[in-house]
Image (tube, grey):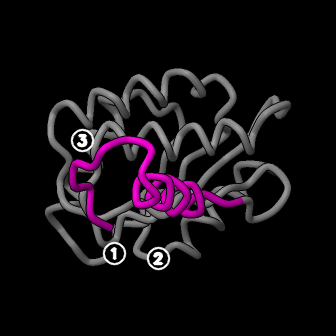
Amino acid sequence: MSMEARPEGTDAFVDEREALRHRVCKVEDRLFLMEEVPIQSPFTIDVMFDRLEELSTGLNQFAYAVDLTGVQRPDAPTRQRLHERVMRINSRLAHVGVAVGLNVVIRAVVRLAAFAIGFRSVTFHMTVEEALEACRRALR
């Protein structure tokens, strides 16, 4: 997914926003999955967290798994936006399961960032299925 600058209102911009929204889905009751884009930005964070908030409306508690297996390290403005968005939902989060795969650099960066961002309950996994299962256990 490319994040090239385009005039707002073009079909490409609308298509891109919709593609980002479809990367966040309901897996089951109170459990969601976020498939992060390879190169994140404050824009992608906002669109995807808007969708997560929309899907979790009315829930006192929920969990989500995030697939970071194919991402690059986000820049400082993107990390700041992520922190802001997590803080908006943190009181309702039962757990976040993070799939990082075999990328040891991303694994290390994500571990440090997760605590700096303010996740209350977070675990790190090789696969998305393992991350989802951790979320299921936290929701029981």
Does 90 sit above or below residue 56? above
- Callout 2: SS: loop
Q: Horizontal placement of 49 versus 104: left or right?
A: right
Q: Nearer the viewer, residue 33 or 49?
A: 49
Question: Residue 68 at what x, y percent from top left?
Answer: 36, 63
Going from the N terminus, do you reach mark 2 or mark 1 first?
1
The stretch in magenta equals 1-25
Q: Residue at x 64, y 22 (%)?
A: 91
Q: Residue at x 59, y 62 (%)?
A: 22
- Residue 121 in the magenta stretch? The answer is no
Residue at image mark 1: 101
Question: Residue 122 at what x, y percent from top left?
Answer: 49, 45
Cα separation, mark 2 vs mark 1, equals 6 Å
Answer few, some or many: residues within 10 Å of disc 3's Cα (few below 14, many 20 plus, some between 14 and 19): few
Q: Nearer the viewer, residue 79 or 105?
A: 79
- Which quarter of the picture shows residue 39? bottom left
Q: Horizontal placement of 3 versus 17: left or right?
A: left
Give amino acid for label 2: Thr
Give amino acid for label 1: Gly
Give amino acid for label 3: Leu
Residue at image mark 2: 127
Figure quadrant of the N terminus: bottom left
- Callout 3: SS: helix
Cα separation, mark 2 vs mark 3, equals 19 Å
Q: Horizontal placement of 13 versus 53: left or right?
A: left
Going from the N terminus, do you reach mark 2 or mark 3 first?
3
Do the residues bearing badges 2 and 1 touch, measured as CB atoms within 8 Å? yes
Do the residues bearing badges 2 and 3 touch, measured as CB atoms within 8 Å? no
Residue 112 is marked as 3
Question: Residue 54 at what x, y percent from top left?
Answer: 71, 38
- Residue 6 in the magenta stretch? The answer is yes
